[in-house]
Structures are given as structure tokens and as C-alpha cells.
């Protein structure tokens, strides 16, 4: 129930702004705009708060980055690239959000915990990212909107050395595509 409410809060401002947006840059120009925004803190998706603070409307690329930042992280079992039931449910919730704005392009990053060799973890991270991509493809998301990358063990979400930390690191996450 709360997931549906959260998705509604993300989709409603997108629908409002997509009717008012004008395009000045043309095709291919959004990559240069999206790259710096991806390195900043996730932007607020509150139209009233940002509009009144800056005196201008939220740009479509900022709104897209905000939507991407709200997408769930998908977690995996130890030494596995198979999607759990919870992971499949999250992806089923993500697919309709992606269909709202065809300009949203994602990079799916596969991650692993620190156990295993670097080459093994890079391979497993790639399999995890591909599993997420393939499931989204089966839900109707267009292939050209999804890229994959593996970071192996190089970007841990939790630097700890216990099972709780390792479980947080076995994940697939969504980033704005370049």
C-alpha cells in the first residue's frame, strides 16, 4: 500500500510537468545534463518546494534523476544471481514507473560482497545486472533503455565485515544512463 502511494507521489508530478515541458536541446543533449546531476544528492521531487525556492520549474532531467533515485535496490542471496520473490515484486512495481517517461534510460549496476576473487565477483555482478535487465525486458521495458555494468566488490554499500554488511553489498541498483 505504501509503495503505491510513493509511486503515485513520483508519477503525479511527472505527469504534470511532462505536459508543460519544452525541449530546447534536441536529441542526445540530455546525457551532458544528466551526468553532473547524478553525482549530486538525490533531488527533491516536490514541485512546490523547489518551484518556490528557485522561482522556476523542475527540469525534466532533474525529475528523471529523482525518479531513478527512488527505485528500489534489488538484493541477492550469497553466490547467486537469481531474483528473489521480493526482487521480482520490486521490478514489477518499477516497470510501470519506467513506462510513464520514455526518456528514462537506466544503467543497472551489479554488485557483490568482498568474498571471492575479483574476476569472479565482476562476473557475478554482471550476471546480477543481466538478471534484472532480462526481467524488466520480460515486463515490456524497451531494451535500448537498459544498460548493465558490474562493479563486483569495488563499491560496497556497507564496508563492514559481517553477514549483515555482506547482504547489503549483494545487490543490483539503478543509475541514470550516460
Image: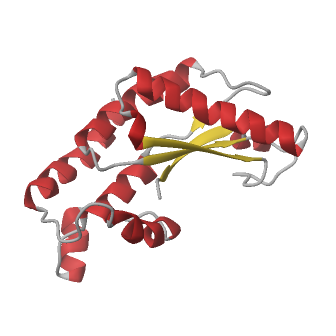
Total number of numbered discs in the rendering? 0
Q: Is residue 32 left or right of residue 47?
A: right
Q: 110 or 51, which lies in front?
A: 110
- Residue 62 placement (x, y as % from top left): 33, 64
Can the viewer see residue 150 in this picture? yes
Can the viewer see residue 44 in this picture? no
Q: Is residue 18 above or below residue 127?
A: below
Q: 175 or 70, which lies in front?
A: 175
Q: Is residue 63 left or right of residue 88?
A: left
In which quadrant of the rendered view does residue 172 lie? Answer: top right
Image quadrant holding the N terminus, namely top left
Q: How is the image coloured?
A: secondary structure
Q: Is residue 142 above or below residue 135?
A: below
- In percent of the image, x 72 and y 43: which residue is there? 169
- Residue 166 placement (x, y as % from top left): 79, 40
Extreme residue in the front direction: 27
Q: 88 or 158, which lies in front?
A: 88
Extreme residue in the left direction: 20
- Residue 124 placement (x, y as % from top left): 75, 33
- In percent of the image, x 21 and y 52: which residue is there? 14
- In percent of the image, x 54 and y 30: which residue is there? 132
- In percent of the image, x 27 and y 44: which residue is there? 102
Amino acid at each position: 500500500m505504501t509503495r503505491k502511494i510513493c509511486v503515485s507521489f513520483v508519477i503525479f508530478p511527472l505527469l504534470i510537468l511532462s505536459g508543460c515541458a519544452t525541449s530546447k536541446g534536441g536529441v542526445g543533449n540530455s546525457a551532458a545534463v544528466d551526468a553532473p546531476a547524478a553525482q549530486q544528492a538525490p533531488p527533491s521531487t516536490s514541485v512546490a518546494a523547489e518551484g518556490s525556492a528557485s522561482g522556476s520549474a523542475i527540469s525534466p532531467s532533474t525529475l528523471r534523476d529523482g525518479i531513478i533515485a527512488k527505485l528500489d535496490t534489488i538484493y541477492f542471496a550469497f553466490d547467486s544471481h537469481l531474483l528473489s520473490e521480493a526482487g521480482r515484486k520490486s521490478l514489477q512495481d518499477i516497470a510501470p514507473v519506467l513506462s510513464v517517461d520514455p526518456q528514462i534510460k537506466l544503467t543497472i549496476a551489479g554488485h557483490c560482497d568482498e568474498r571471492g576473487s575479483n574476476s569472479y565477483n565482476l562476473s557475478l555482478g554482471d550476471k546480477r545486472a543481466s538478471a534484472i535487465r532480462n526481467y524488466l525486458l520480460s515486463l515490456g521495458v524497451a531494451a535500448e533503455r537498459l544498460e548493465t555494468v558490474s562493479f563486483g566488490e569495488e563499491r560496497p554499500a556497507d564496508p563492514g565485515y559481517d553477514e549483515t554488511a555482506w547482504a547489503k553489498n549483494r545487490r543490483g541498483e539503478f543509475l541514470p544512463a550516460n
